[in-house]
Image: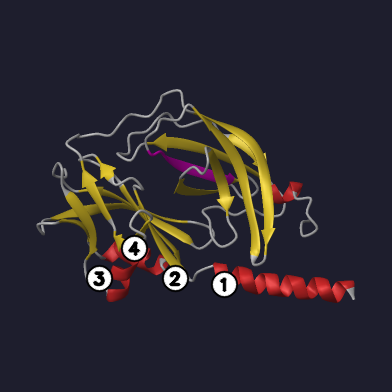
């Protein structure tokens, strides 16, 4: 009887968790709305929205001012994550105008894509078009040169439709401005490297994946190494860190669902 009850609980839990995993979604960076005249931009797509990101190889992406002036964004690279996540990295082809509000625009954009190019405004409690506003500065604040990343632990959490697995790093001496971390992870058993830009969460850097998506995945056993290049939203970076080696998070998973 206990086994039947456990099975039912797991089944309902999985259905509930699947409902929490949307079939698509877009994120737009910088997260901050105030940018310099030479900012980088990252557009990130989840699940079915990855198709839109990959289409940027054959399309033109712009920033459009309120007066209708277009500035083309130059695609630098497309990075494919290991769990339903893909991102495109852009630089403007020319310097942006000061004190100007810019909206994102795609060539041949569909009605669906226009709806996707929105974010939720917590203050106004509604969704609005993705935009950034420039200051009169050519560059943003430099990062603290004493910024360091220290390995804390690996961790696995199990949910209804899959585990969340990460190598967790503490961030010290971070500046107040937005920081991106170009993250390189190597599977030492296959000597296979994956690269993705990630951001912090509560002063920690989680290298791995969540229940539904993520930049990096891990095998049940094995060793990995990672290094980071911290940068501000203008793409000005600090020195790349040394490599840190860690075991797959699943090797230390003590839960009943682990190995």
Q: Which residues are magenta?
A: 178-186
As rendered, which of 223 and 148 lies closer to the eye?
148
Quadrant in which the C terminus appears: bottom right
Measured in 3D between alpha carbons, the distance from the residue under mark 1 to the one under mark 3, in whole angstroms, is: 28 Å
Q: How busy is the neighbourhood of tag 2: few (under 14 within 10 Å), some, or many (20 plus)? A: some
159 vs 169, left or right, is: right
Q: Which residue is mark 4?
A: 127
Q: From the viewer's perspective, is the residue at label 1 or at label 2 nearer? A: 1
129 vs 184, left or right, is: left
Q: From the viewer's perspective, is the residue at label 4 or at label 1 nearer? A: 4
Q: Which residue is mark 1?
A: 19
Q: How busy is the neighbourhood of tag 1: few (under 14 within 10 Å), some, or many (20 plus)? A: few
As rendered, which of 88 and 14 lies closer to the eye?
14
Q: Which residue is mark 3?
A: 109
Q: Is residue 230 visible?
A: yes
| Residue 67, above or below 172 | below
* Marks 2 and 3, the one that precedes in the sequence: 2
Residue located at (40% from left, 56% from top): 87
- Give residue 171's mark: none
């Amino acid at each position: 009887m206990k086994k039947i009850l456990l099975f039912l609980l797991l089944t309902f839990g999985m259905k509930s968790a699947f409902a929490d995993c949307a079939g698509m979604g877009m994120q737009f960076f910088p997260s901050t709305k105030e940018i310099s005249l030479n900012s980088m931009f990252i557009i990130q797509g989840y699940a079915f929205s990855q198709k839109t990101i990959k289409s940027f190889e054959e399309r033109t992406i712009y920033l459009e001012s309120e007066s209708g002036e277009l500035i083309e964004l130059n695609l630098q690279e497309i990075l494919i994550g290991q769990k339903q996540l893909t991102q495109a990295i852009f630089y403007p082809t020319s310097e942006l105008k000061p004190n100007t509000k810019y909206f994102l625009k795609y060539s041949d954009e569909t009605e669906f894509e226009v709806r996707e190019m929105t974010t939720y405004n917590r203050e106004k409690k509604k969704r609005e078009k993705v935009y950034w506003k420039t200051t009169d500065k050519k560059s943003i604040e430099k990062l603290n040169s004493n910024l360091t990343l220290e390995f804390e632990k690996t961790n696995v959490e199990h949910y209804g439709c899959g585990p969340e697995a990460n190598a967790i790093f503490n961030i010290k001496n971070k500046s107040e401005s937005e920081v991106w971390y170009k993250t390189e992870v190597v599977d030492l058993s296959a000597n296979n490297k994956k690269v993705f830009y990630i951001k912090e969460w509560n002063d920690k850097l989680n290298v791995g994946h969540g229940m539904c998506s993520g930049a990096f995945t891990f095998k049940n056993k094995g060793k990995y190494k990672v290094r980071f290049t911290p940068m501000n939203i203008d793409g000005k970076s600090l020195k790349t860190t040394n490599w840190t080696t860690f075991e797959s998070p699943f090797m230390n998973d003590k839960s009943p669902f682990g190995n």
